[in-house]
């Protein structure tokens, strides 16, 4: 059965975009010390959040090929559809990076040439000057273009090859399967490096005087968790609309397990990073947490509680991972929790003490991006059969029971 976007769904996504943009407009007009910087920072936090969801599903999609996982075959197109947001997400991130390089925003303090000008005593920063071999615009853009091009290329290749496999049988299908396997291995090797690199370049360098050896893994954990949550909520939505009839409780439970497991991975990385920095008490490491604990304790500890305690308590049992309404409710809460995590990574570092609390600007951009994201994903679902037609493990996936 092919998926079609209902008029109600189209209206909903359009309403999200319009309401979000109106709220963002009111937020821009609000009482902010630097309207331009605040707007760019809020836009960037939301651009990264939804881009990371697409990347998380792209990674998991490739991981299933490498591990030759059978049970995910029936929901393969869902992960594909979410990953189709990656090209659009790359553009939104690229806009902010270009604006930063051109001086239209000051999210990355090190991009200001005055910070490395020894003749400018008022703005010269010794620490930034020591990092110029790595943090310089030409090298930064080489890395950014290489990463974005890689993500977009594999997103399009996996999708194209998946649709092509629907027309294949026998030895041809097996050859395509192994081609998928080898390409996925290559992607995961690149992703293992690039996922940390983008965390260092695009997020950690905002707080340029701060360092953390675990930050790349921590960002990756949040990226993966966001993808898993989005996928299970989307599958349950489709099931509720009468699609994916062959997807059973065992598939849903396994997807719930991934939400549970990856939430624990993220929590572990967050706690270990914090514990090591707290224990060592090194000045250049504690700055990141000090500003957040002193000025935004509810944001920092609140999002940690939502992202750690809720999955631990509410998704522990087998029944909870098989209950659609319960799983959607918990998934939405964790989804919002990881959005809060992205906000607390970007806003305090970009705005310093000018960031006081989450307001209409951040929420407005969230709703607008959510509308664009949902429309992109649903459109991708409507452009191909909702379930793969041919796959070596299709029969095994259909009869998956635990």
Image (tube, rainbow, N blue to C red):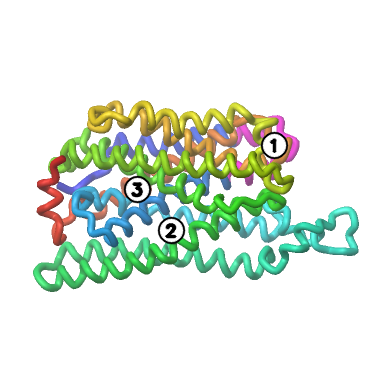
Q: Secondary structure at mark 3?
A: helix
**Residue 355 visible (yes or no):** yes
Work out which quarter of the rendered image holds the C terminus and state it. top left
Q: Secondary structure at mark 2?
A: helix
Which dot marks residue 291? 1
**Residue 105 visible (yes or no):** no
Q: Residue at x 20, y 42 (%)?
A: 251
Q: Secondary structure at mark 1?
A: helix
Q: Which residues are magenta?
A: 25-43
Foreground residue, 105 or 331?
Answer: 331
The residue that disc 2 covers is 87
Foreground residue, 343 or 393?
Answer: 393
The residue that disc 3 covers is 377
Give the CA distance from mark 1 to mark 3: 37 Å
Q: Is residue 225 above or below residue 142?
A: above
Please tell me whether mark 2 or mark 1 is closer to you in this view.
1
Q: Residue at x 72, y 36 (%)?
A: 354
Question: Residue 56 appears at what percent x and percent y?
Answer: 40, 51
């Amino acid at each position: 059965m092919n998926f079609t976007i209902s008029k109600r769904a189209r209206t909903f996504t359009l309403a999200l975009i319009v309401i979000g943009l109106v709220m963002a407009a009111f937020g821009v007009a609000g009482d902010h010390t630097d309207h331009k910087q605040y707007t760019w920072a809020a836009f960037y936090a939301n651009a990264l959040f939804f881009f990371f969801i697409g990347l998380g599903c792209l990674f998991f999609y490739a991981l299933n090929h490498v591990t030759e996982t059978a049970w995910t075959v029936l929901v393969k197109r869902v992960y594909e559809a979410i990953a189709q947001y990656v090209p659009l997400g790359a553009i939104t991130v690229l806009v902010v990076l270009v604006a930063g390089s051109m001086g239209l925003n000051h999210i990355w303090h090190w991009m200001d040439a005055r910070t490395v000008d020894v003749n400018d005593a008022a703005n010269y920063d010794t620490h930034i000057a020591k990092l110029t071999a790595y943090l310089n615009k030409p090298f930064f853009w080489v890395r950014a273009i290489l990463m974005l091009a890689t993500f977009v290329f594999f997103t399009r290749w996996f999708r194209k090859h998946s649709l092509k496999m629907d027309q294949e049988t026998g030895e041809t299908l097996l050859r395509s399967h192994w081609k998928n396997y080898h390409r996925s291995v290559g992607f995961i090797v690149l992703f293992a490096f690039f996922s940390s690199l983008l965390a260092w370049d695009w997020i950690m360098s905002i707080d340029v005087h701060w360092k953390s050896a675990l930050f790349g893994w921590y960002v990756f954990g949040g990226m993966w968790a966001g993808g898993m949550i989005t996928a299970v909520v989307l599958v349950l939505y489709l099931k509720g609309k009468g699609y994916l009839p062959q997807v059973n409780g065992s598939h849903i439970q396994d997807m719930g397990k991934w939400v549970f497991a990856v939430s624990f991975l993220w929590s572990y990385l967050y706690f270990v990073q914090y514990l090591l920095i707290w224990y060592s008490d090194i000045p250049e490491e504690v700055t990141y947490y000090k500003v957040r604990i002193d000025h935004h304790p509810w944001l920092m500890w609140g999002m940690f509680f939502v992202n750690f305690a809720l999955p631990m308590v509410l998704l522990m049992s087998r029944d909870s991972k098989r209950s659609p309404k319960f799983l959607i409710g918990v998934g939405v809460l964790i989804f919002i929790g990881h959005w809060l995590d992205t906000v607390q990574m970007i806003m305090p570092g970009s705005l310093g003490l000018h960031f006081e609390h989450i307001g209409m600007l951040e929420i407005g951009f969230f709703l607008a991006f959510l509308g664009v994201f949902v429309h992109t994903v649903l459109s991708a679902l409507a452009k191909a059969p909702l379930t793969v037609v041919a796959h070596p493990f299709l029969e095994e996936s259909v009869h998956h029971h635990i």
